[in-house]
Image (spheres, rainbow, N blue to C red):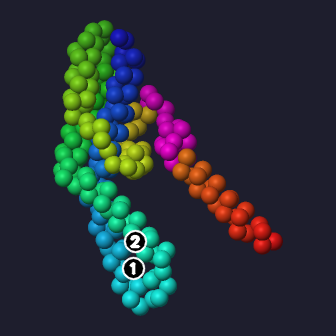
Amino acid sequence: MNKQDLLKSITDTAYNVGFGAKKHFATYDIVEKIPGLIGFISMAIGIFALYLDSLSSKTVSALLAVFGVIGMYISMYNSEKKQYKEKGILLTQLFNELKTLYYRVKAFNGNDLSQEQQELQSIESRYYANAITKQIMFSDWYAHMKFFWQHQIDWIDEQKHFKLWRDKIPFSAYVAFGIIVITVIVYVIKEVVPCL
């Protein structure tokens, strides 16, 4: 493997490891923070419902029930949240090792890169052995934000050349946006157009 191919392999692995670390942290953050937020919002609505009759409607009650179901779904991950944090830290360490390896290979002027190739394979093996495949819903979206907007990834972008619309926004966000737009259009056609 020549130097340029090895640099590309390192950044490909670094993308997977770095995004994986952020996905573990995203799952941890969601499990750690969202139930408290749901509890606070539900309690605040419940208190205001004592004063405002409009908050005592079936719609508000249904929304609070949905919040309760979301809280129950998230609580299924509660017993494992510490593990997600620990694995996120470990994967971040591997990511930093890859960054060091990348700059060492980039500055290398010799012909024998076999030691660096073995080091890359070792890091990949540790990544596969430690990554947790089961992640909470919407951790992908949150991980995209954490990886592309909070993480220092310029050195990966040197090889991968990330594009905003293709790489930095998850495909499922486009699908969700499309569903919302179609739903609004259908609503407008059904509710507003007949009135005209």
User: Is residue 159 found inside the magenta-colored segment of the image?
Assistant: yes
Residue labelled with disc 2: 64
The answer to whether any part of residue 102 appears in the image is yes
Residue reaching furthest front? Answer: 58
Instruction: Give the residue displayed 26% in from the left and 38% down from the top.
Output: 132
Instruction: Give the residue displayed 26% in from the left and 26% down from the top.
Output: 124
* Location of residue 163 with respect to 173 vertically, above or below: above
Q: Position of residue 72 (x, y in %)?
A: 30, 60
Characterize the magenta stretch by its predominant secondary structure: helix
* Location of residue 72 with respect to 124 vertically, above or below: below
Horizontally, is 56 left or right of 175 in the view? left
Relative to the observer, which residue lies in front, 181 or 160? 181
Q: Which residues are magenta?
A: 158-174
Residue 45 circle label: 1
Horizontally, is 23 left or right of 130 in the view? right
**For residue 106, which quarter of the picture?**
top left
Q: Are marks 2 and 1 in contact (CB under 8 Å)?
A: yes
In terms of sequence position, does the residue under pointer 2 or pointer 1 come before the other? 1
Instruction: Give the residue displayed 46% in from the left and 30% down from the top.
Output: 160
Instruction: Give the residue displayed 19% in from the left and 46% down from the top.
Output: 83
